[in-house]
Amino acid sequence: MAVVDVEIVTRQHAILSASSAERWLTCTPSARIEEGIEDKDSEFSSDGTAAHAFAELRLRHLLKQITKAEYLAGYEATKTLYAEQVKEWVVSDWEAIDSYVQYVLDEAKRLDATVYIEARVDYSKYAESGFGTSDALLVSETQATIKSIDLKFGKGVMVSARRNPQAMLYALGGLLGFDPKHVITVVEWAIVQPRLDYIGEDTMTAVDLIRWAQEVVAPAAELAWEGKGTLTPSAKACRFCKAAATCRARAAENVLIARRDFMTHPDPNLMEMDEVARILPDLDQWMAWANKLKAYALEQARDKGAEIPGYKLVRGRANRAWNDSKDIVEELKSAGVSETVIYSEPSLRSVAQLEKALGKKEFAPLASKLVVTPLGTPALVPISDPREAVNKVSEAHAAFGIDK
């Protein structure tokens, strides 16, 4: 098994990126619509970024692309960089990374392949400025095969490898970038989702992959690059689209669910089972859209200061908590509260628990100096809601003790 030294490339995203191919191949205008919407790092994407960094380090070490000293130093640096993510990981999460690494090594051995880690691939011949980063690209001259392997660290939705356009574009870029003096006849790709115990594989001939690029990718990419075509909502295309919450086509499609021909049934009051059966498959997609729209509206009001007619931002209910004093227990003891009341093994009782144990009258004098009530989580509610609207200026003044 041969190995090569490759430069570590910072991941970038093209307008017609491989990772968004599920969208722009079927809903071509989405590429340009998304272009004007800011990217957001979710907890899940940050988790995946951390996993990729550790997997890359381990692979480079095992493939002897870096020394043990470099690996150990890189490991500590990476662990510090992604401290927020890894503090929540358990043994199975680290084992998941190892299982991906082992799969890459096993496939490299099977194919007698050269291994390129975090390989930049370019398929701009068929999609304007199209490029991406393959987590692992295996090139076998002896078996005339290229294989792209993609690590997915999520544990929510399983990503099928079967004719997966992202994986196919990675493989296409690898095929196009390989030294033309060598003939590749077979193209393979795999998606490894170790926290779901899933490894999906697919393959096609190099000739068929090029034909797909010519007949499917190129026409769609031309429309997508120019922002043309028809908005075509679908569960797969909309799942991670940045415009999914406010896309007019998606809203129209979901609203139409309630206006289908089952409304003209002879019984105008109650649906029959055949009507229920027709609407059930659409409900998950409808609810996903509705939840995204609600989250978008809340974010705009909370973070951008947007005014939404008929709605206001209020604070949700917040539970009382002990203040940040390090001497809570000593304060309680000095007030005559016994340790048997203070503790609910193995920890300090919550505010509510201690109040119940002592009684409200005895607890009240302690609350003024030991208890805080944090601001509740913001919620977007109709203007008719009796709760007072959030005034961020007043809250800031109160926090810093500034008189209005």
Image (cartoon, rainbow, N blue to C red):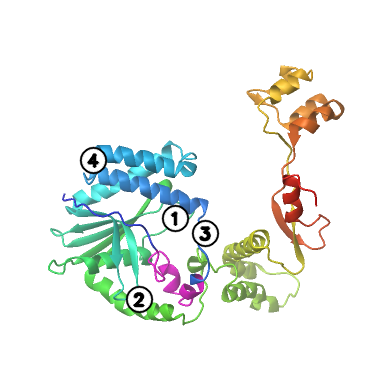
Decide which of tag 1 and tag 3 comes sooner along the chain.
3
Q: Look at discs 1 and 2 and give the one toward the viewer.
A: 2
242 relative position to 174: left or right: right
When the figure is inspected, residue 202 is found, relative to residue 223, above or below; the finding is: above
Q: Nearer the viewer, residue 343 or 390?
A: 390
Mark 1 burial class by Cα count in 10 Å: few <14, some 14-19, many 20+: some
Decide which of tag 2 and tag 3 comes sooner along the chain.
3
Which residue is under mark 2? 128
Q: Amino acid at mark 1?
A: Met
Cα distance between the residues tagged 3 and 4: 35 Å
21 relative position to 286: left or right: left
Q: Amino acid at mark 4?
A: Thr
Residue 311 shown in magenta: no
Mark 2 burial class by Cα count in 10 Å: few <14, some 14-19, many 20+: some
Decide which of tag 1 and tag 2 comes sooner along the chain.
2
Q: Where on the picture, by quarter, is residue 224? A: bottom left
Q: Which disc is residue 40 wearing?
A: 3
Q: Look at discs 2 and 4 and give the one toward the viewer.
A: 4
Which residue is under mark 4? 67
Label 1 SS: loop
**Magenta segment range?**
13-34
Decide which of tag 4 and tag 1 comes sooner along the chain.
4
Cα distance between the residues tagged 1 and 3: 22 Å
Cα distance between the residues tagged 2 and 4: 39 Å
Q: Which disc is residue 288 wearing?
A: none
Q: Position of residue 66 (x, y in %)?
A: 24, 44
Q: Are marks 3 and 4 in contact (CB under 8 Å)?
A: no
Label 4 SS: loop
Residue 26 shown in magenta: yes
Cα distance between the residues tagged 4 and 1: 35 Å
